[in-house]
Amino acid sequence: TGKDIATPTRTKEVLEKYGFSFKKSLGQNFLIDTNILHNIIEAADLTKEKAAIEIGPGIGALTEQLGRAAGKVMAIEIDQRLLPILSDTLSPYENIEVVHGDVLDLDLHALLAEKLSGFDKISVVANLPYYVTTPILMKLLEERLPLENIVVMIQKEVAERIAAKPGSKEYGSLSVAAQFYAQTQVAMIVPASVFIPRPNVDSAVICLQVREKPPVEVDDVDVFFRVVKGSFALRRKTLLNNLMNGLFPKTQKEEVVQMLTDIGIEPTRRGETLSMEEFARLANESIRRGL
Ligand code: SAM
């Protein structure tokens, strides 16, 4: 299978051969360190019986490692200029298929059925374009794709927000959303020196182990997330203030205080101290009381 793509020498060779210039607007920072790639692959726990989806293969640095570790790989790339490069660099790997498109526009359920049928364990493994990290992750989770895990390189700050616990500075609606659908863990912090060009933010690899069902009983997912977002709206305000301002503006204050007291949540607490279980209790009770 030849020498690895993810070395500084080989990467420069490929870029020069094709006269490729990076597009900052597409979040193009390519990995040039095989050790990091091996760690990512290991975290994804792939076997030849499993399939992998990569978002943004670039010139194929991670893709070829996925091809070696998994039974089949589907790689989705938005930048048309990379397609001829990928068919060159990935030519030794018959189990890799590149799909041209914007991952945010594609019908992933249909693509999975078409390209990865027969695989019931599927991972998403990627070095994500940082400008669209959150929309991509939320799409993967909210569409309830049949994924085993998601192992992705993202900005360190976003990784910390995703894995944050109640009461911490980083805890917010993204933490609750990610942890509703998955068990989250920051696997490693990654220095900017392993990319060309170097990004000007710190990076981290996050592992999301997708849950079969949410860890809390929620009567209406939309209401639950509206309550979560509403509770975080103004971080310095109390939960009661946030609920009165945004979520239940037409309800009497006394009624909201009564509800919170009845379900054992102190109205003067800040929204960012509530656990997922408390958000679920609050959302379910507000539906029950018709607020
Ligand atoms: N995987 C390669 C690596 O690690 O060297 C490249 C990673 S680079 C951070 C992000 C890649 O995602 C680029 O190849 C970029 O063109 C691609 N990309 C950006 N936006 C995309 C989108 N909306 N859908 C699919 N791919 C996208």
Image (cartoon, grey):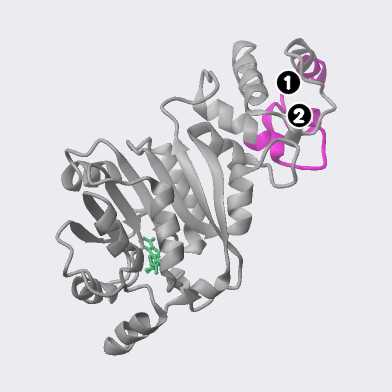
In the figure, 207 relative to 131: above or below? Answer: above
Query: For the point 32% across and 86% down, which residue is it?
Result: 13
- Magenta stretch in the rendered image: 229-257
Using residue 222 as the reference point, say whether residue 30 is left or right of it.
Answer: left
- Give whichever of 154, 259 is nearer the camera: 154
Question: Disc 2 marks which residue?
Answer: 244
Ligand 1, by image quadrant, is: bottom left
Query: For the point 53% across and 24% down, which residue is it?
Result: 215
Quarter of the view holding residue 40: bottom left
The location of residue 115, given as percent across then percent down, is 18, 48
Secondary element type, mark 2: helix
Q: Is residue 231 magenta?
A: yes
The location of residue 119, given as percent across then percent down, is 22, 39
The location of residue 287, given as percent across then percent down, is 59, 16
In the figure, 71 relative to 165: above or below? Answer: below
Q: Quadrant where the N terminus lies?
A: bottom left
| Alpha carbons under labels 1 and 2: distance apart | 8 Å
Query: For the point 47% across and 44% down, which residue is it?
Result: 138
- Give whichever of 237, 213 is nearer the camera: 213
The location of residue 148, given as percent across then percent down, is 37, 38
- Give whichever of 40, 264 is nearer the camera: 40
> Label 2 sits on what residue type?
Met
- Give whichever of 226, 70 is nearer the camera: 70
Secondary element type, mark 1: loop
Question: Disc 1 marks which residue?
Answer: 251
Using residue 32 as the reference point, say whether residue 228 is left or right of it.
Answer: right
Residue 106 shows up from this direction: no
Which residue in the rendered view is the most extreme toward the right?
Answer: 268
Q: Is residue 167 magenta?
A: no
Number of disc labels: 2
Using residue 175 as the reference point, say whether residue 63 is left or right of it.
Answer: left
Q: Is the Cβ of the residue at disc 1 closer than 8 Å to that at disc 2? A: yes
